[in-house]
Image: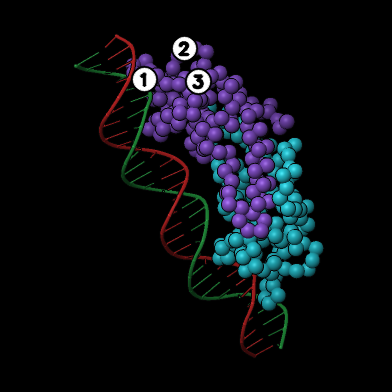
Chain colours: A purple, B cyan, C red, D green
Amino acid sequence: MKLSVKVDYACRVLARMARLHGTDALAHIEELARIESVPANYLVQILTELRNGGLITSRRGKQGGYALARAPQDITLYDIVKVIEGDLLEINMASEGQSGRRVSQIWAEVRGRLEILCKDYTLDKFALKPTDEMYYI
Amino acid sequence: MKLSVKVDYACRVLARMARLHGTDALAHIEELARIESVPANYLVQILTELRNGGLITSRRGKQGGYALARAPQDITLYDIVKVIEGDLLEINMASEGQSGRRVSQIWAEVRGRLEILCKDYTLDKFALKPTDEMYYI
DNA sequence: ATCGACTTTGACCGAAAGCTTCACGGGCGC
DNA sequence: GCGCCCGTGAAGCTTTCGGTCAAAGTCGAT
């Protein structure tokens, strides 16, 4: 159960774009790739998925670029993972074996609680500088 | 971020063994494989890992078999994942790019909360029949 | 002692997923 | 029309995962 690099990239890039929110500046692929250390060619695909997922908007041509589709405080970690990975904690359906159903049920409950947890983390929190003042609630 | 089949198998098998806890019966590989629909040859590896992780004990020879190393209520979902996967929610260290550190920090916090959450699910809960009386807390 | 059942270990392999790169098509502003 | 930047799809490489196989080690029963 490891966090994919793709999600990591997406979070970093969105964090960068969150800082640009409010201004009318657009983010450019090359710039994002350089600042956040993401392979540009890979980033294109990620941005496309984020756009199809409704998290960002794009504009083509000269003076084109990317921007958040809505305010940073309206975009959660849950949204990001949902768009990129499709599912937080994908569970093996089928539920085979004598204990299959019960195990699936428990994991589904864990997923539910994890989703609620992830919805607490909005994108504006990503724009802040790292602190060690963060504790578990 | 999908739950591996391996963890699923481990949970199912441990659930089965939890039901045997208290009796002096031992679980056998072929029996476990059949009842929980896990490939026997694969199950061998999983049981070995669980034993090395201290969750179960084994006894060789005729009338050998496997049993839980401690009471079901002392084995949590967290323990299982830790032994099998090594880490709940493995995070990409390195923290590259301008937002890398901050993103890593947030995910680390999510992991911490997820760990706490998983420690609530003990193995004795796995032995119960599936119910729909379970709600999120 | 020896036989047989079971565990233990390690090597191996095919398939799938993940990460990355390349090449080319398409819209927008000047 | 030209340059710039986004858009799309496909192909390659690497790693992980799920599963198999073979051979050796261990112990209990007889």
User: Which sits in the foreground, A100 or B54?
Assistant: A100
Query: Which numbered disc covers residue A24?
Result: 2
Q: Are marks 3 and 2 in contact (CB under 8 Å)?
A: no
- Judging from the image, mark 1 belongs to the subunit labelled A
Q: Residue at x 70, y 30 (%)?
A: A135
Please name which of the two marks, 2 or 1, marks the residue nearer to the observer.
1
User: Which sits in the foreground, A128 or A22?
Assistant: A22
Q: Residue at x 40, y 25 (%)?
A: A29
Does residue B50 appear anywhere in the picture?
no
Q: Quadrant of residue A71?
A: top right
Q: Quadrant of residue A66?
A: top left
What's the distance in space between the residues labelled 3 and 2, CA to CA?
13 Å
Query: SS class of the residue under badge 2?
Result: loop
Find residue A98 and report its horizontal and vertical position in percent. Answer: 66, 58
- Judging from the image, mark 3 belongs to the subunit labelled A
What's the distance in space between the residues labelled 1 and 3, CA to CA?
15 Å
Query: SS class of the residue under badge 3?
Result: loop
- Judging from the image, mark 2 belongs to the subunit labelled A
Residue type at the position of mark 3: Ala
Q: Earlier in the sequence, mark 1 or mark 3?
A: 1
Find residue A61 and report its horizontal and vertical position in percent. Answer: 34, 18
Please name which of the two marks, 3 or 2, marks the residue nearer to the observer.
3
Residue type at the position of mark 1: Arg
